[in-house]
Amino acid sequence: MSAPHPIGGLPTEALPQLYLDGVSRAFDGFKAINNLSLVIDKGELRAVIGPNGAGKTTMMDIITGKTRPDTGQVLWEQSVDLTKLDEADTARLGIGRKFQKPTVFESHTVEDNLALALKADRSPWATLFHRTTAAETARIDELLGLIRLGNLRDWMAGSLSHGQKQWLEIGMLLAQDPQLLLIDEPAAGMTDAETMWTADLLKSIAGERSVIVVEHDMEFVRALDCKVTVLHQGSVLAEGRLETVSAMPEVIEVYLGR
Amino acid sequence: MLIDRRLGIFLAGLFVLVVVVPAGNLWLAGQPVPTYLVALIGKYLCYALLAVALDLVWGFCGILSLGHGAFFALGGYAMGMYLMREIGDRGVYANPTLPDFMVFIGWKQLPWYWWGFDHFWFAASMVLLVPGALAFVFGWFTFRSRVAGVYLSIITQAMTYALMLAFFRNEMGFGGNNGLTDFKDVLGYDLGGGGTKVGLMVLSAVALAAGLLLARAITVSRLGKVLVCLRDAESRTRFLGYRVEHYKLFIFTVSAMMAGVAGALYVPQVGIINPSEFSPANSIEIVIWVALGGRGTLVGAALGAILVALAKTLLTGWLPEVWLFALGAMFVLVTIGLPTGVLGALEGGLARTRRAPEPAEREA
Ligand SMILES: Nc1ncnc2c1ncn2[C@@H]1O[C@H](COP(=O)(O)OP(=O)(O)OP(=O)(O)O)[C@@H](O)[C@H]1O
Ligand SMILES: [Mg+2]
């Protein structure tokens, strides 16, 4: 899907997957995103933290084309202007998104949820005459194993537990074969053991794909063991290792001052 | 599976009807099935097809159209125009080209939009094309601008209301208030003849079976699964890369064409089409059929239409003034008492609805 863009002779790995520069977006005068700049490298795992209302979800809305920024640049692989695209476009480009509130297709089976997410021609004509191939079934088996829902493939997704829905949704993202995964609060409603396992899963995904994870659970963020961006009032407050940023006075103030 | 148990049973029932009714009307001694009953059954079958069309968009795609009667009426008018041209010079004014109502309002020549309707094949294609084109254009503007839910329902209702007002006008050239009527024959067959009535009723049954099979084929395909996705979680569907508006447009157009066919079969059987077919109340009644029979089941929708139409025939015979109250009461009782509709209740009575087992203990 994503051909490398050897711009200026730089090696491909050095090119950012995603580049946000000076992005702002106001709702009724309230700046939910305020001059936000962010660079995500190819294959990078990045955690984004910040108090409620910091603009984390809105940032993902902007990257995926759900919300248009008032000003600023959002570039994909240094060439595609994401602000011109909508949700379906960005999904087709290779951006997968997990919602803050886990959302799966409740009246479809677990297997169908994955099948519908598999990378394929999305036109009505193609889906009308679609026949499941052996390769698709094999890929679904593989994904079911990865998200540990192998024994629930015929279950209605609506009857899954909260945590299982989170995993299924991550599995659906993987089925899309995206270059970048945006994961909004994956650990919400999970037990400690599930949380740690989810962190491992995301770590194993990164490398091959870029991953941005938004999460409030600091144990989870620590387990991700990656660069952390602290968002506050719509812009980046601090960036670095979790130990470093959590020791910064301005970050402590934001978290304790509420 | 294309034909599941409920569809199989329903199709078998239709088949029995197609054998028993013609036999009882045309061939058995003493005519146990009177001709008026044949026409009545044919009419019910057209309603059933219309209900299936609505269930396709509402039950599977979440588009609550309160204007589906418009597509039905347009299909009916297309057929009615052909039937008018078939009258030829046998009208009251004996004008070979102009229908009576045009002579009456002093028109001298046939308006351009009546051209071609003297050919059956032309009228038959218009039965599909006119409702299909209206649905396509309507859907193009509304779905693309992401109008959904109650707003969409209101706009569909406004659409059928506007059409009703337009068709009421004599200058529109569709017979105004009185609509199109006094038909003589269809494809040379006398519309008053019992044989023709039986033929039309059988054709309606075939159309209903075909409509059910088509709807079923669509809903069990992957496209049908995508429709359910966007009904239940539209945003999730978009973020998977599906162009939600294209899917809505597809199913809305297919559904409108199906409604058009229902209308086209209805008109020769009742012998008239007039603007009241566009009335908002008609479209709301279709929704009641589907809800009552069981939304999202196709067969349930067809069943609902037949049951309500039957109740209407009986009640308007006995107590015409209570019919509307009875319809309202039926609707309220079913929505409260039988949330899965009559079909759901029937099947639930036969076997407890299968439920997913309790979540098993997950390995840590
Ligand atoms: N469509 C919208 N219309 C109006 N205000 C909005 C809209 N979307 C977001 N906001 C506002 O923007 C701010 C940022 O919201 P956002 O959901 O991005 O925060 P968040 O960091 O994800 O918070 P949380 O941790 O609670 O999920 C909030 O004050 C929210 O009310
Ligand atoms: Mg959020």
Image: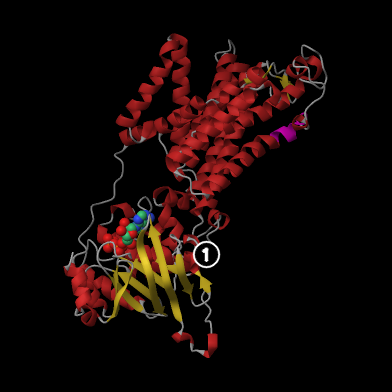
Question: Could you tell me the amino acid type at mark 1?
Answer: Lys
In the displayed structure, B95 sits above or below A181; it is: above
- State which chain disc 1 sits on: A
Question: If the image is split into quadrants, where does the C terminus of chain B sit?
Answer: bottom left
Q: Nearer the viewer, residue A60 or B310?
A: A60
Q: How many marks?
A: 1
| Residue neighbourhood size for the residue with mark 1, other residues' Cα within 10 Å, grouped as few (<14), some (14–19), many (≥20) | few
Residue B171 relative to residue A122: left or right: right
- Residue B190 locus on image (x, y percent): 72, 18
Relative height, residue B70 to residue B237 (above, below): above
Residue nearest the observer in this picture, B133 or B44: B133
Q: Tell me which corner region of the image, top left, top right, bottom left or bottom right, holds residue A167.
A: bottom left
Q: Answer yes or no: is residue B206 visible.
A: no
Q: Considering only vertical position in the picture, is B74 above or below A246?
A: above
Among the 4 quarters of the image, the one containing residue B74: top right
Q: Which residue is mark 1?
A: A84
- Does B248 sit left or right of A142 as displayed? right
Q: Looking at the magenta stretch, what is its main secondary structure?
A: helix
Q: Is residue B87 visible?
A: yes
Q: Position of residue A238 (x, y in %)?
A: 28, 77
User: Under 8 Å from ligand 1: the CB of mark 1?
Assistant: no
What sort of colour scheme is used for the picture? secondary structure
Bounds of the magenta segment: B117-124
In x, y percent, where is residue B211? 56, 38
Most distant residue in the left direction: A256
In the rendered image, residue A162 lying in the magenta stretch gets the answer: no
Q: Would residue A193 be found to the left or right of residue A239 on screen? A: left
Q: Residue at x 42, y 80 (%)?
A: A42
Callout 1 secondary element: helix
**Residue at (52, 42) in percent of width and height:** B215
Residue A174 coordinates in the image, percent (x, y):
40, 69
